[in-house]
């Protein structure tokens, strides 16, 4: 893809709508835009339910950029409630994409590493074939395809291993368990890129400001680690010396299978002239005080 989108001079084109604004990412993205003095409206689920077709069409009118941070994110629950998850992650995304397209807005759809099977041994390229292994992953993959079909001016931004101040997340859980337990066992055979919601929010803004071409991007930290490696860093940040031992996914079975290898490559960002998020460990050190507060 070589075409770049020239930032519009139309004032409406600069108006941002954040859908799912009360979630972990949506809260940080709305704050990031407000802090920068942007014209932004954030709608939580109580203001806009993406399963409501008429409300969705009405909500996007007059906006130049629509960011979909709304999702069914309960990965394990989705196994038994796939149709419900699909209604939000696929049909809801399709509806928002169609409405954004009709309104002439750019659509940013946040997606996930769970669209891949995790069997790779090198970072996934943006155009790697989708092969989700969980119900959640299937619904998010369907959401991606719906967005591609409905909104030509889309940016699909896949992220992974998100943590932030405004939601339940892995670092908060491990810091709590580290304080409560005598020892911890954490899986060491799943690797990925822990990513701060504030960094992802900033990346989304930078993509739009750069006039990045429509397409698929990977919004994760650089580098890679395992949940065990991440936990070691989290405990150190929390000032805890709880003994920590590595374990395997087989010893920690959950309803939804997790991809073993969730490392995403960042070539599309570089091609668009947008710097990827920094190394996961350095970014965690920057985030820790705020996230664990
Ligand atoms: N968290 C991760 O590790 C992770 C990893 C990869 C990708 N992602 C993706 O990143 C994005 C943001 O995730 P997040 O971590 O910020 O999740 P989150 O905190 O669960 O936020 C999602 C928000 O969507 C809202 N929502 C659910 N159903 C809705 C509906 N029908 N209409 C409108 N809003 C609805 C939720 O409201 P309620 O709370 O009221 O249900 C919640 O506020 C999602 O697309 C997710 O798939 C997350």
Image (spheres, grey):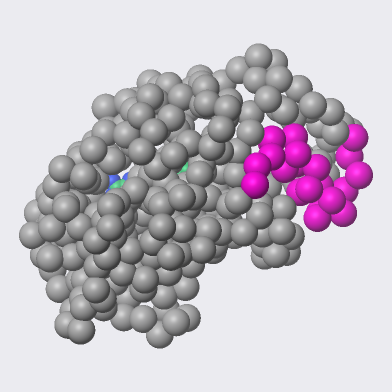
Up-down: is 53 above or below 105? Answer: above
Q: Residue sitting at 39 percent across and 33 percent down?
A: 128
Left or right: 173 with respect to 105? right
| Residue 107 visible in the shown view | no
Q: Quadrant of residue 141?
A: top left
Left or right: 248 with respect to 217? right
Q: Position of residue 213 (x, y in %)?
A: 28, 60
Left or right: 247 with respect to 96? right
Q: Position of residue 253 (x, y in %)?
A: 61, 17
Left or right: 289 with respect to 261? right
Residue range highlighted in magenta: 223-243
| Residue 254 visible in the shown view | yes
Q: Position of residue 189 (x, y in %)?
A: 68, 25
Residue 225 in the magenta stretch? The answer is: yes
Point out the residue furthest to the front here. Answer: 2
Up-down: is 41 above or below 201? Answer: below
Residue 113 in the magenta stretch? The answer is: no
Point out the residue furthest to the top here. Answer: 250
Q: Nearer the viewer, residue 198 or 86?
A: 198
Q: Residue sitting at 16 percent across and 59 percent down?
A: 100
Q: Residue sitting at 50 percent across and 44 percent down?
A: 265
- Quarter of the C terminus within the rendering: bottom right
Q: Position of residue 170 (x, y in %)?
A: 64, 43
Q: Quadrant of residue 273?
A: bottom left
Q: Quadrant of residue 237?
A: bottom right
Q: Residue sitting at 27 percent across and 65 percent down?
A: 4
């Amino acid at each position: 893809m070589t075409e770049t989108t020239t930032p519009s001079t139309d004032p409406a084109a600069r108006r941002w709508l954040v859908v799912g604004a009360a979630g972990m990412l949506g809260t940080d993205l709305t704050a990031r835009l407000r802090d920068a003095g942007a014209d932004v409206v954030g709608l939580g689920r109580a203001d806009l339910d993406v399963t409501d077709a008429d409300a969705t069409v009405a909500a996007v009118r007059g906006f130049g950029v629509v960011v979909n941070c709304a999702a069914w994110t309960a990965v394990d629950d989705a196994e038994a409630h796939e149709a419900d998850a699909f209604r939000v992650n696929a049909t809801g995304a399709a509806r928002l994409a169609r409405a954004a397209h009709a309104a002439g807005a750019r659509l940013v759809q946040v997606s996930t590493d769970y669209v891949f099977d995790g069997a790779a041994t090198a970072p996934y390229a943006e155009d790697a074939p989708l092969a989700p292994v969980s119900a959640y992953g299937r619904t998010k993959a369907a959401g991606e395809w719906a967005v591609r079909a409905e909104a030509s001016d889309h940016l699909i931004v896949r992220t992974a291993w998100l943590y932030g101040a405004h939601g339940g997340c892995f670092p908060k859980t491990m810091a709590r368990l580290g304080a409560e337990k005598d020892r911890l066992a954490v899986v060491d055979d799943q690797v990925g890129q822990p990513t701060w919601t504030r960094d992802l929010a900033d990346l989304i803004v930078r993509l739009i400001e750069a006039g990045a071409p429509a397409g698929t991007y990977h919004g994760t930290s650089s580098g890679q680690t395992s949940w065990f490696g991440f936990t070691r860093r989290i405990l150190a940040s929390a000032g805890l010396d709880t003994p920590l031992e590595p374990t395997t996914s087989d010893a920690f079975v959950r309803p939804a299978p997790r991809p073993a290898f969730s490392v995403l490559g960042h070539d599309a960002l570089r091609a668009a002239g947008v710097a990827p998020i920094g190394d996961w460990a350095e970014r965690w050190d920057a985030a820790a005080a705020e996230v664990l507060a």
